[in-house]
Amino acid sequence: MFLCMVLISLNCNSALLKQKNDVEDTRTFGVPLSCLLNLPSVNIPRIVTNICEFLLKYGLCVEGIFRVNGSAKKICSLKSLFDVSPDFNLTNSYVHDIHAICGVFKLFLREIPDGLVPALPTKSVIKVLMILDTLAEENYILLKYICSFLRKFLAHESVNKMPASNLGIVFGPSLNLSLINLIIYSLVNLWFAHKILTDNEIWRLE
């Protein structure tokens, strides 16, 4: 799955190089979060709320949601559409492409410069509170939003077969690609995912 997403990212980026400069200037993927939050009232990238709202409406009870790979061709196509407009309308006609939509969502997270959760020494990864306290405000807000979003899928895990451990495996590489020790990272990631998805007390008081 991880290799698949890397190949999709490379193929999509290659295709995007062929697009016109005016499209490149408005791209959504691979740019700092601060560049996507250019309005005072906006603290979550529009592409994220757009996709999350769609998935909450149509994907809560889809077995293997986020885990089943979508079509690489459709993911690249959706990426191009969202680069032109993060408000691209995901109508119910896209329900049959729901795994591709999950794929483009994970791809967006993967391509955030420096990762949504910046690289830290492996020995410090399990210190969840320390990790959260080091995040830039826009990263923290987005991570909290995503965790709140994923909790809704945990509430339906008996149907969609996606407990916290599965979500950790799926979203770990999308949140941070910088940790080299993949074995340790995978084990820590399961614990980290369970902690941030189920423990309200670790979040900063608003």
Image (spheres, rainbow, N blue to C red):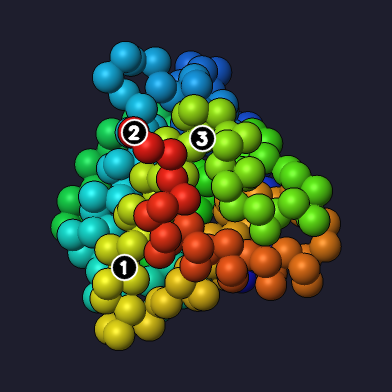
Q: Residues within 10 Å of mark 1 (few under 14, many from 20)?
A: many
Q: Residues within 10 Å of mark 2 (few under 14, many from 20)?
A: few
Question: Residue 69: percent from the left, percent from the top?
Answer: 49, 70
Q: CA distance from mark 3 to mark 2?
A: 15 Å
Residue 103 at least partly seen: no
Q: Which mark is residue 206?
A: 2
Secondary structure of the residue carrying tag 3 is helix
Task: Identify which amino acid the numbered label 1 is placed on.
Answer: Phe
Question: Residue 132: percent from the left, percent from the top?
Answer: 56, 42
Task: Identify which amino acid the numbered label 3 is placed on.
Answer: Asn
Please give the count of numbered marks on the rendered protein: 3
CB atoms of marks 3 and 2 within 8 Å: no
Question: Residue 142: percent from the left, percent from the top?
Answer: 43, 39
Task: Identify which amino acid the numbered label 2 is placed on.
Answer: Glu
Residue displayed at 56% across by 29% down: 136
- Identify the residue position indicated by label 3 in the image: 139
Q: Earlier in the sequence, mark 1 or mark 2?
A: 1
Q: Give the vertical position of 135 relative to 4 (above or below).
A: above
Residue displayed at 37% across by 37% down: 205
Secondary structure of the residue carrying tag 1 is helix
Q: Which mark is residue 153?
A: 1
Question: Residue 15: percent from the left, percent from the top?
Answer: 60, 41
Residue displayed at 36% across by 60% down: 150
Between 195 and 38, the one lying in front of the other is 195
